[in-house]
Image (tube, rainbow, N blue to C red):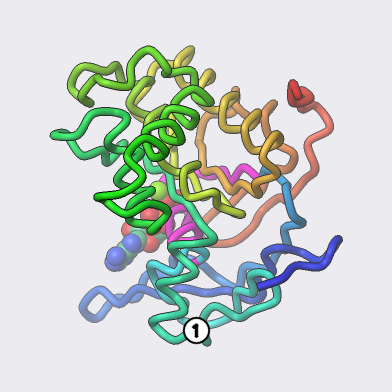
């Protein structure tokens, strides 16, 4: 999949998602349209139930739309075969969730290595030295170099979220989808995590869609899209943002 300069990396048109709950219908998203240029850091805000997670899940190809289109790098993802969709999820995207979803029986480094093995970057038997080195580089990027042998239970919430970010980066994604990464963290730790995601995204030229309901985080966004009841109520470039420290 190639991407021309200045073409949107993501183009969403008239996107709707209706959940059927017995005889009731829940309109989680209602004809949402927007485009994201490459390398933009977009925050999606809005009250609980406004459709933020649904939007991420549709872009991430882990749920399918009722109507509308999602074009990523010029390709309509709803037209993907299941093999192509798997490849898309595996190669192009990374997810970071509110709950860190680390494997509790693996150390920080092993959690990152597992993703690298799944990416078939390394075979489980060969390349042990290289896989360790590369995993350590990702953990260094999130400032966790001195915690690589800790198990998740031996890490604070903020450190666990850093491991989850290192693991997401190990896929070398074009697009990073982040759902309420600070939900389990105190304000100060949460802000460090969001600042870290923004800095790394700028350094590595990753397009980010990050869901947050914390208005104090908006200084890290290039753009803020606000959802209410499944519809966009505002979409604005953030002129107040702090510049990434590159
Ligand atoms: N799997 C589902 N089945 C039925 N309704 C759902 C499902 N997922 C989300 N919803 C509903 O869709 C709406 C949007 O949900 P969601 O995208 O999770 O909102 P947010 O992430 O903004 O809190 C809510 O009314 C929610 O109850
Ligand atoms: Mg949500």
User: Pointer 1: residues within 10 angstroms few (<14), some, or many (20+)?
Assistant: some
Q: Cβ(mark 1) to ligand 1 < 8 Å?
A: no
Q: Nearer the viewer, residue 242 or 133?
A: 133
Q: How many marks?
A: 1
* Image-quarter location of ligand 1: bottom left
Q: Nearer the viewer, residue 99 or 143?
A: 143
Residue 33: image quadrant is bottom right
Q: Which residue is pictured at 42% across the width and 17% down the height? A: 145
Residue 66 at least partly seen: yes
Q: Can residue 209 be found in the magenta stretch?
A: no
Q: Which residue is pictured at 26% across the width and 38% down the height? A: 102
Residue 49 at least partly seen: no
Q: Nearer the viewer, residue 243 or 17?
A: 243
In percent of width and height, residue 176 lies at: 54, 49
Q: Which residue is pictured at 77% across the width and 56% down the height? A: 37
Q: Can residue 44 be found in the magenta stretch?
A: yes
Would you say 1 lies left or right of 96 here? right
Residue 9: image quadrant is bottom right
The quadrant the N terminus occupies is bottom right
The quadrant the C terminus occupies is top right
Q: Which residue is pictured at 73% across the width and 47% down the height? A: 40
Determine whether 155 is above or below 65 in the image.
above
Would you say 166 lies left or right of 214 here? left
Residue 45: image quadrant is top right
In percent of width and height, residue 159 lies at: 36, 20
Return the residue at label 1: 80
Would you say 100 lies left or right of 205 here? left
User: Range of the magenta residues?
Assistant: 42-58
């Amino acid at each position: 999949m190639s991407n021309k300069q200045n073409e949107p990396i993501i183009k969403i048109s008239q996107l709707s998602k209706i959940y059927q709950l017995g005889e009731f219908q829940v309109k989680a998203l209602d004809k949402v349209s927007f485009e994201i240029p490459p390398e933009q850091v977009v925050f999606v805000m809005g009250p609980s139930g406004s459709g933020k997670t649904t939007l991420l899940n549709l872009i991430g190809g882990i749920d399918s739309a009722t109507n509308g289109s999602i074009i990523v790098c010029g390709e309509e993802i709803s037209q993907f075969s299941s093999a192509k969709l798997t490849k898309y999820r595996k190669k192009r995207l990374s997810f970071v969730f509110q709950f860190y979803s680390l494997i509790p029986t693996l150390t920080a480094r092993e959690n990152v290595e597992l993703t690298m093995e799944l990416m078939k970057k390394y075979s489980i038997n060969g390349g042990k030295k290289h896989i360790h080195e590369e995993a350590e580089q990702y953990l260094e990027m999130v400032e966790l170099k001195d915690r690589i042998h800790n198990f998740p239970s031996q890490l604070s919430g903020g450190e666990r979220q850093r491991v989850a970010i290192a693991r997401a980066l190990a896929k070398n994604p074009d697009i990073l989808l982040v759902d309420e990464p600070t939900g389990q963290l105190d304000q100060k730790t949460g802000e460090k995590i969001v600042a870290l995601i923004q800095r790394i995204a700028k350094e590595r030229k990753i397009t980010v869609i990050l869901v947050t309901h914390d208005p104090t985080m908006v200084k890290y966004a290039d753009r803020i899209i606000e959802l209410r009841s499944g519809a966009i109520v505002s979409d604005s470039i953030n002129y107040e943002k702090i510049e990434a420290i590159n």
